């Protein structure tokens, strides 16, 4: 049975999609069976996995509205060697269309029940807002991976996200918990980064992943080539960090 994880943060530009795509590719390199679900109407995870969102006939939009099932919608990332449940701009309309549907918060969870046995990991890339789409991700997941930069504003947003996760846990998904915080775009030369990092370790203890993802230009370049960073330049520091993070995830779920 797959372990299902949301990659979520209500703050934008913190490396959610980069983390989701590269973790998927890193886990695939460790011989894990992976499905990456793109819940963001921007479709960046879809593009980052090497799939042209403009040519898709069906997407996660059809899955959420019950018009198709995951088996017929998923596509293979040739560059990353994992499956993708893709998204494009159509998904923005699902917010409005799901409002009147039964079990609107659990549409994704119910759809994933049929394919959960086919994967070791299912990763969900959530949009940067607490929307009905994000709520579907949180209701479907066993846990949340929170990527965050080590800066002051990130700490402010973190408390909001933790409160949101507590509310979803209490009211909609009692399995949901924080799996860990991942420090991304880390620059050890900045004193503030080191201070915030130390503060995270002090407050969250072993909930902070040991792996730290450095600020790395090769990770930023990879999506323009339609490839995860770990495949685009495997020798880069960013790629090595995400492969290490994949290994840490595999170890962490053994104790879950």
Image: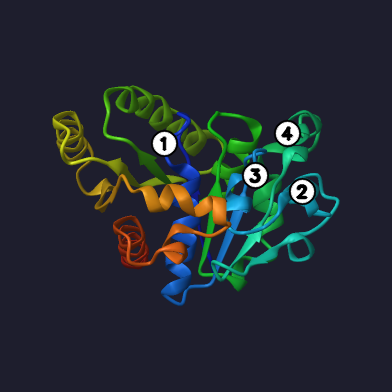
* Tag 2 secondary structure: helix
Kindly identify which numbered label has been placed on residue 14: 1
Q: CA distance from mark 1 to mark 3?
A: 16 Å
Q: Earlier in the sequence, mark 2 or mark 3?
A: 3
- Left or right: 86 with respect to 214? right
Residue where numbered disc 3 is placed:
43
Question: Where on the picture, by quarter, is residue 154?
Answer: top left
Q: Residue at x 65, y 32 (%)?
A: 132
Q: Earlier in the sequence, mark 2 or mark 4?
A: 2
Within 10 angstroms of label 3, few (less than 14), some, or many (20 or more) residues? many
* Tag 3 secondary structure: loop
Q: Position of residue 222 (x, y in %)?
A: 48, 54
- 3 to 100, vertically: above or below: below
Of labels 2 and 4, the one closer to you: 2
Within 10 angstroms of label 2, few (less than 14), some, or many (20 or more) residues? few
Q: CA distance from mark 4 to mark 1?
A: 21 Å
Q: CA distance from mark 2 to mark 1?
A: 25 Å
Q: Residue at x 58, y 44 (%)?
A: 137
* Tag 1 secondary structure: loop
Q: CA distance from mark 4 to mark 3?
A: 10 Å
Q: Earlier in the sequence, mark 1 or mark 3?
A: 1
Q: Which is more toward the observer, 47 or 178?
A: 47
Q: CA distance from mark 2 to mark 4?
A: 15 Å
Residue where numbered disc 2 is placed:
54
- Left or right: 176 with respect to 52? left
Q: CA distance from mark 2 to mark 3?
A: 10 Å
């Amino acid at each position: 049975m797959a372990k299902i994880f949301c990659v979520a943060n209500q703050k934008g530009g913190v490396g959610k999609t980069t983390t989701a795509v590269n973790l998927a590719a890193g886990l695939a390199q460790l011989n894990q069976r992976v499905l990456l679900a793109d819940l963001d109407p921007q479709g960046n995870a879809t593009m980052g996995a090497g799939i042209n969102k403009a040519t898709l006939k069906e997407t996660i939009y059809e899955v959420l509205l019950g018009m198709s099932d995951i088996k017929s919608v998923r596509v293979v990332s040739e560059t990353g060697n994992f499956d993708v449940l893709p998204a494009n701009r159509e998904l923005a309309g699902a917010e409005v269309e799901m409002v009147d549907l039964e079990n609107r918060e659990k549409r994704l969870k119910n759809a994933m029940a049929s394919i959960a046995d086919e994967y070791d990991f299912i990763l969900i890339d959530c949009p940067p807002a607490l929307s009905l789409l994000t709520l579907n991700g949180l209701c479907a997941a066993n846990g949340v991976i929170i990527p965050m930069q080590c800066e002051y504003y990130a700490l402010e947003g973190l408390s909001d996200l933790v409160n949101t996760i507590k509310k979803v846990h209490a009211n909609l998904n009692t399995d949901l918990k924080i799996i860990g915080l991942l420090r991304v775009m880390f620059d050890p030369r900045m004193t503030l980064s080191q201070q915030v990092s130390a503060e995270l370790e002090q407050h969250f203890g072993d909930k902070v992943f040991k792996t730290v993802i450095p600020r790395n230009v090769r990770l930023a370049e990879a999506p323009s080539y339609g490839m995860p960073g770990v495949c685009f330049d495997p020798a880069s520091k960013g790629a090595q960090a995400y492969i290490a993070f994949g290994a840490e995830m595999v170890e962490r779920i053994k104790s879950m």
